Image (cartoon, rainbow, N blue to C red):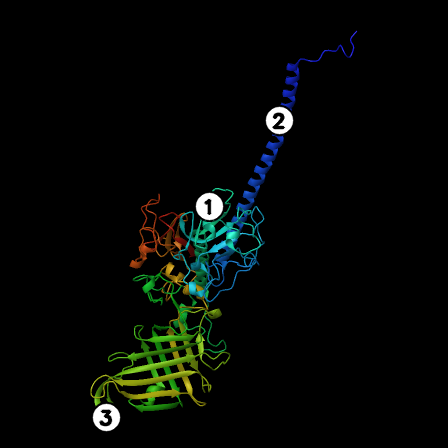
Amino acid sequence: MWSEHTRQKPPKRQQGAALLVLLTLVVLVGAGLLLEGLNRSTDNQVAAEAHTMRALAEAKAALVGRAVNDANRPGSLPCPDTDNDGVAELFAGIQCPSYIGRLPWKTLRMANILDGSGETLWYALSSSFRDHGSAEPINSETLGLISVNGAAGMVAAIIAPGAPVVAQQNRTSNNDDDYLEGENANDDLVFINAVRSNTFNDRVMPIAQTDVMPLVERRILGEVGQVLRTFRDGKWSPWNEAAAWNPVDPDDTWNNRELYPWLSPFGAGPVASVYNGAVGTREGLLPFSWPGEQFFTTFKAKWNINNADTTVSGTVTLGELEVGDITFNGTSTQCTWTTIEQVNCNVTALAGQPGNPGLLTCLGEPNTQINRKFEFVFTADSGDPDGVKIKRPKWDKHRERDLKINTTPFPITSNVLVRITDIAVSGPQSGNQCGQGTLVDDADTGGEIEGKKIQFDLGVPDELPLWLVSNNWHQLLYVAASSIHVGDGSGAPPPVPCAPGTDCLTLVGTTASNAVQAIVVSAGAQLAGQNRVTGTLGSYYEFDPNHALQPLVGNDTAGDDEFVRLRRTNAFNDQVHIIAP
């Protein structure tokens, strides 16, 4: 029998093997727990990084959207938030208080999106894109001043600060070096992305000029297209609905045509242009005028007045102030629209021109050659059925404008001025005023005064927005219209379309049509090989020489009625908007 004392102990080798098995189990369990922890940590890091990238992308979309849709200065961006209240800082003079701070999420009308570590995003802005008049012009030629990883010309940069790293313990402050690291924290315009470490964990997302301006261009093309469509569709109303005068005047049948304005010649380039419409120009720049801008225009003056008060002296007679019918040519008549309701026109009739009486006696000197200056001022009388009427399309949309007062008696405040002044240009009295007469209407003045076909280009700011001109977008747009849909309406009345291949414009490329009525093209930024100082069409507009559709004339040749729409490349960045098919 075996007793407790006689039971044999297992060999030491067996004891060692059991211990090894047990140790192995412990190690394996521990390794499994460690691996699970490491995987969990790695998953957390991946999730945090993905969250950060989504936050950066959302912030970028919000900033780009804000730039594109800005009501007063498209392309501009707000100042950074320097006190962490979510609101962009107000300007200090003409500058942002700081060009680096936190993302102004309240100003952008969005939630306070945080990075993967729960921190508010930071934001750096190029001062050239600040939303202030002193930064203008802001357009496709405006360069950003920020660089990210060596790429220059950035409009802005958004930075996710990540969790605090070594030496960053004061995260209650608004100091960038408590959140950002290295190159990103030295208050300059240079930013970097780098490998994560215990001393660097920033993530930077740039906003390039090409992220913003092509979208702004698209908006501007749409707005200009709508302005020109509204101009085209403006229907002229009689000056007085109850009067028999002019509701169906055969001489004014052109008023009923659907027409685009004569354009401003491209000439020596957009910078040198005066932006006034020129008769016969159907490819060129937008025609526009500011209140108070003087321009040349054809002007027909006709007056037949009786019982007017007059002031007459010297060579000017009463009859010349009471009766006249003169058409002045467009190279001599200067008009100024001081408002959309008032125009001042003057013309000096030289020897041999309409309105010049020839040789007169001036201050006792016979046979003196004079220059005769005519001045006319017309101001509309709002709501006065007997006052000056300015004929225009509905909704105050302008093209050539006619003015007339035709009543007996004139109203006391008819706001019409006719003045004639003679100046000697030969003989002993050369340079002296020979005579002057001014017509002044009173209670018993009767008759009519007309001013006809006075040019009025697109008005700023009542038709074209002020920001479009103040930011020089008008220098980067090219407009063309078919030969029967522009100017004085020499073609058939609407709704006759242009004839494909004959009167119409042709568009080729990604969109093709040979029946385009009108078109507007944006030039985009200057490309390699272009030099806009030269002012040539090809320095603004291009075709892609490597495209499969070659050979094409492209957008760089005037007068061929052919335009090209292609996808953006390094050699082509024109954008084309069809105003009407």
Amino acid type for the residue under numbered disc 3: Gly
Mark 2–mark 1 Cα distance, whole angstroms, equals 40 Å
Q: Secondary structure at mark 3?
A: loop
Q: Secondary structure at mark 2?
A: helix
Residue drawn at x 26%, y 87% is: 432
Q: Is there any visible trace of residue 479 in the rendered image? A: no
Image side of residue 61 versus residue 433, left or right? right
Amino acid type for the residue under numbered disc 2: Val
Q: Residue furthest front?
A: 5
Crowding near the residue tagged with mark 1, few <14, some 14–19, many ≥20 C-alpha atoms within 10 Å: some
The quarter of the picture where residue 264 lies is bottom left
Label pair 2/3, CB-CB below 8 angstroms: no
Q: Secondary structure at mark 1?
A: loop
For the image shown, how many numbered marks are present on the structure? Answer: 3
- State the residue position of label 3: 364
Amino acid type for the residue under numbered disc 1: Asn
Percent coordinates x, y for residue 236 in the rendering: 45, 70
Question: Which numbered disc, 2 or 3, marks the residue that appears first in the sequence?
Answer: 2
What number is the disc on residue 193? 1
The residue lying toward the viewer, choosing from 32 and 338, is 32
What number is the disc on residue 27? 2
The image quadrant where one finds the N terminus is: top right
Percent coordinates x, y for residue 445 in the rendering: 42, 88
Mark 1–mark 3 Cα distance, whole angstroms, equals 88 Å
The image quadrant where one finds the C terminus is: bottom left
What number is the disc on residue 549? none
The quarter of the picture where residue 300 lies is bottom left
Label pair 2/1, CB-CB below 8 angstroms: no
Question: Which numbered disc, 2 or 1, marks the residue that appears first in the sequence?
Answer: 2
Percent coordinates x, y for residue 338 in the rendering: 41, 76
Percent coordinates x, y for residue 399 in the rendering: 41, 69
